[in-house]
Image: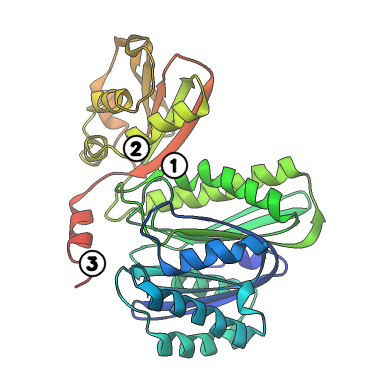
Amino acid sequence: MAFLSICAVPGVKAWGMKEGKYGLALIEAHGTAAGVFTENLVRAAPVDLMRKQIKAGKLDAVIVNSGCANAYTGKRGVADAVTMTEYAGSVLDVKPSRVGVASTGVIGRYLDLPRIQRQCKAVAPKLARNAEAEVVTAQAIMTTDTVQKHALVKKDGFCIGGICKGSGMIAPNMGTMLAFIYTDAEIGATPLADALKLATRRSFNRVVVDGDTSTNDIALCTATGEAGKVKLAEFKAALEECCRSLAMQIAADGEGATKLLEIIVKGAKKEDDAEKVARTVIESPLVKTAVYGEDPNWGRVVAAAGRAGVKFDPNAVSLWISDNSKKYPLVKSGEIIADLVAAKNAMHGKNVTFILDLAAGKAEATAWGCDLTERYVEINGRYTT
């Protein structure tokens, strides 16, 4: 693989390693930083630590371990997260308070700090900006992921690159996902934080694999400033594009998934309404299993929309199904016009899209997910054993 994303951003160096299911990655980049975090009440130690440290609006590096979540580990877990920042600070010669930390893996297990320290010392001398560095860094943070996830958005005068991991325990308000995003744009901490929150709302927070919200979700964005100042509107659009690409890759790689599911809701009174409907439909087990079975049981989409807590006239809605090449009408202004044969054919590919028009306004939102298969149960039924 020769693709570059974070390693294409000036000012960013990275490397990682994997020993069985235990990985470690280091990313060095000095600049303004912002973060968004899980909304689960049960938060992992690195999340609590980073919610405090990111207030300074600066990062010089990030250290990430996979295989152990360091979640529900009490005071020892917090101390261990701090120790991880000290390990990275020592090998990279930066202040521990300027080191971002993230963990992913099994909940309720303590970190193997000697292993992490040894891996940290092995990784640090190899930090680089090339394709190999990109690959080993992305591999190091994976757990049940089956593919690496990279995104790069190039604009006139600046770029934004990101890597992430995420496959299961994925639900709105972030999922079991870690994302590390970098840009060479020069931007202040407050506008960067605002841009990341908005991009997250329209990307990571609209992905559902299984409906479980993780304890460990972190997305960090660092701006090295090497490209100079850019127009804020252009930056926000580029950041959203980058996050959306990563979010869709997470959805497509859902545990046991065979299809990427996209729900586009149009005609809502406001974006919040469209978002609620899209998220409710995308997380419906009945919709997800129908997509897996290529069963054109489109009534499940309308039924899920109806329980989203959003007011609309069911007799005014329109619904289509699409295979990304053509869309087929199922309902038009409340009238059933479904061609079930055509609808079933549209479900044969790797991508299935439902477009729902609520006919209540002009706002819209999109959510992403995947089908629900037997393989999901197999993966999670034996996750720790």
What residue type is disc 3 on? Tyr
What residue type is disc 1 on? Arg
Q: Are marks 3 and 2 in contact (CB under 8 Å)?
A: no
The earlier-in-sequence mark between 3 and 1 is 1
The image quarter containing residue 92 is bottom right
Name the residue located 33 percent from the left edge and 9 percent from the top edge: 315
Label 2 element class? helix
Residue bearing mark 1: 206
Name the residue located 43 percent from the left edge and 69 percent from the top edge: 45
* Percent of width and height locating residue 296: 24, 28
Q: Are marks 2 and 1 in contact (CB under 8 Å)?
A: yes
The earlier-in-sequence mark between 3 and 2 is 2
* Percent of width and height locating residue 233: 72, 40
**Residue 282, disc:** 2
Q: Reply above or below: 383 against 124.
A: above
Front one among 348 and 67: 67
Whole-Å distance between the Cαs marked 3 and 2?
24 Å
Q: Reply above or below: 340 against 102.
A: above
